[in-house]
Image (cartoon, rainbow, N blue to C red):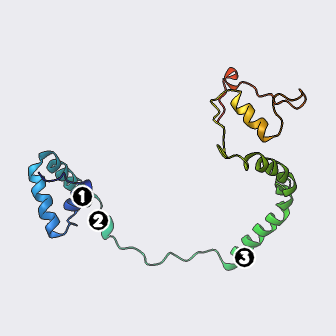
Amino acid sequence: MSRAIQEHENHGFVDGALPKADRRAVEARLRADPAVFERARAYARQNDALHEAFDRVLAEAHTPRLPESRCGAWRRAAALALGIGIGFLARDQFAAHRVHRATLAPPAALAHVAYVPEVLHPVEVVAQEEPPHPVAWLSKRLDAPPARAAARRLRVPAARRSALAGIG
């Protein structure tokens, strides 16, 4: 028994893009499978409808060049100068929103120290595991075991009681 016709073969057959040998093989398989043959006929009807609707658009003459702008060179230069001026005057408005390296470095260093030594799960702890595992893991990473003094003890809220779910 011959293999089933692949969709790309069906489209290639309908579009006339298959080599002769492949075309003959696909024709033989289409004769053997009426459902696939009907699908190929539907593709051919769709192609005919598209050609009927849009061939006239493809045949239309097109302009080789875009029309020249009526805006003079001096107007373009004025618009450019205005944009540069507005950008220069507004530069201080956005300076307050910049992240400075000094504010980013300490949390990044802490994250680095916490995660780099981890071998088992260097990126995340499975959040579905309620304490004690995530608390023990984080305590070990931060050198603050849960059994130490109350001032250094980690307190992790139970996320499920708050209808929250941790992701790691």
> What residue would you read off at disc 2?
56
- Look at 15% across and 48% down and name the residue there: 38
**Among the 4 quarters of the image, the one containing residue 151:** top right
Give the spatial CA distance, label 3 vs label 1.
53 Å
Instruction: Report x, y in % for residue 22.
Output: 17, 65
> What residue would you read off at disc 1?
11
Instruction: Report x, y in % for residue 2.
Output: 13, 53
Count neighbours of disc 2 (C-alpha within 10 A) and say few if under 14, some if 14 to 19, many if 20 or more: few
Relative to residue 7, is residue 29 drawn left or right?
left
Q: Nearer the viewer, mark 3 or mark 1?
A: 1
Q: Would you place residue 6 above or below residue 70 in this image? A: above
25 and 97: which is toward the camera:
25
Residue type at numbered disc 3: Ala
90 and 129: which is toward the camera:
129
Badge 1 marks a residue whose secondary structure is: helix
Instruction: Report x, y in % for residue 163.
Output: 66, 23
What is the quadrant of the C terminus in the image?
Answer: top right
Circles 1, 2 touching at the beta carbon (< 8 Å):
no
Badge 2 marks a residue whose secondary structure is: helix
Count neighbours of disc 1 (C-alpha within 10 A) and say few if under 14, some if 14 to 19, many if 20 or more: some
Give the spatial CA distance, label 1 vs label 2.
24 Å
